[in-house]
Amino acid sequence: MYIEQLYTGCLSEAAYFISSEGEAAIIDPLRDVDVYIKMAADKGVKIKYIFETHFHADFVSGHLELSKKTGAPIVYGPGANAAKFDVYLAKDNEEFAVGKLKIKALHTPGHTLESTCYLLSDEAGAAHCVFTGDTLFVGDVGRPDLFSGNLTKEELASMMYTSLQTKIKTLADNVIVYPAHGPGSSCGKNLGPQTFSTIGEQKATNYALKDMTQQEFVKVVTDGLTTPPAYFPINARINKEGYESLDAVMEKAAVALSIADFKEQVKNGAYILDTRNATVFTQGFVPESISVGLEGRFAEFAGSILPFDQPIVLVTEAGKEKESALRLARVGIDNVRGYLKGGFEGWSAAGEKVDLIIDIDADELAMDIPHDSRLEIIDVRKPGEFNSGHVKGALNMPLDTLRDPLNIAMIEG
């Protein structure tokens, strides 16, 4: 038996590779699937199944890419009828063999209607681990407010209570918990720092597994939910309906644009995305660029503030063109139409107009505020961060709302 967690920090996402006796299964793959194919080739195993815990909202899954390249079927749990492609809908408690291992589908609605966990039993038939998707995290559970149908978050939270009580808490304490996400994910309220745990540890420490009534559970799980990133419903739809092949997306993005071609793209409505480090960006950038540095939670921020229906051209650090386009594609931003050849350095060397941002420290800002009545302070952090402390008189406009026409009017007015 071999199990490997493949964790992608900038998305707080965990995919899983499982193999036994020449067969393998992948759970919740990312869109760039070559890593799983290479792992299977290196181990001399054939990918037999692709298991999805639910229709993901925070990234574009690699189920279609991987199925096309390997022929393995895509398995969802009960309720995943919205898929616009061929899937195998597992029944509750249905078992799948991977070598000498057994993987049982446990339908656990709550985060979404089709949410399903997968319980893996070892060669001796003992329950070894459970892949919980967004049903159970380390220290948290999946938020019940992402479903776009006619159910309220309270109704879904009620379902989650039943799922946890009847399917998760009944497992042995030594069963390993492998969730789909770790700390920083917006799929829960406050995930713990670890990316795996055990059922026993979660019973002892996870607030959502404490003994409480269903009514109490619904209240504690739904209280304090922040607005999810704007791209979540877009990614959920993409994962249900399908998407263009990643190879085709990357081919379109790999075009080195001359300054003239770059300008033509912008003239025709392309957004300029600069993926260099923010500290470098402020010292000089192509006018009208949007800065989302590759460091940190790049894809999540990009998905929250960039359009999905307009072309994008890139300005990157040399050698980072492919990585920038790939990480955008992970959240379904497939409309990159090339990158500026020579980067910002080539732009400025050609004598083109540049812009910059002047950084000021806190002491200087504190001195300016009382003496400049025209000074407007915009705090672009999330409401929870703003409410925990902010500059007096600052106006809170979270980053993902800045393109809202009302906010633009307020800033310009």
Image: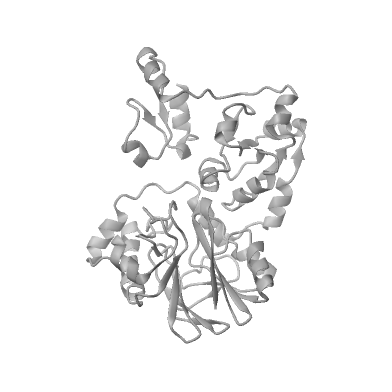
Please indicate whether residue 229 sits to the left or right of residue 151 in the image.
Answer: right
Counting the numbered discs, the total is 0
Please indicate whether residue 135 sits to the left or right of residue 287 in the image.
Answer: left
- Is 50 situated above or below 102? above
| Residue 345 visible within the image | yes
Expressed as whole percent of the image width and height from the top left, the position of residue 359 reads 50, 24
- Is 33 situated above or below 350? below
Expressed as whole percent of the image width and height from the top left, the position of residue 375 reads 41, 18
**Residue at figure coordinates x 32%, y 26% from the top left:** 392
**Residue at figure coordinates x 23%, y 61% from the top left:** 216
Q: Report the coloring of the rendering.
A: one colour
User: Which of these two is toward me, 231 or 380?
Assistant: 380
**Residue at figure coordinates x 55%, y 85% from the top left:** 100
The C terminus sits in image quarter: top left
Please indicate whether residue 35 sits to the left or right of residue 167 in the image.
Answer: right
View extreme (top): residue:
371
- Is 62 situated above or below 327? below
Q: Quadrant of residue 338?
A: top right
View extreme (bottom): residue:
124
The N terminus sits in image quarter: bottom right
Expressed as whole percent of the image width and height from the top left, the position of residue 350 reads 75, 24
Q: Quadrant of residue 222?
A: bottom left
User: Which of these two is toward me, 123 or 356?
Assistant: 123
Expressed as whole percent of the image width and height from the top left, the position of residue 178 reads 45, 67
| Residue 115 visible within the image | no
Q: Quadrant of residue 337?
A: top right
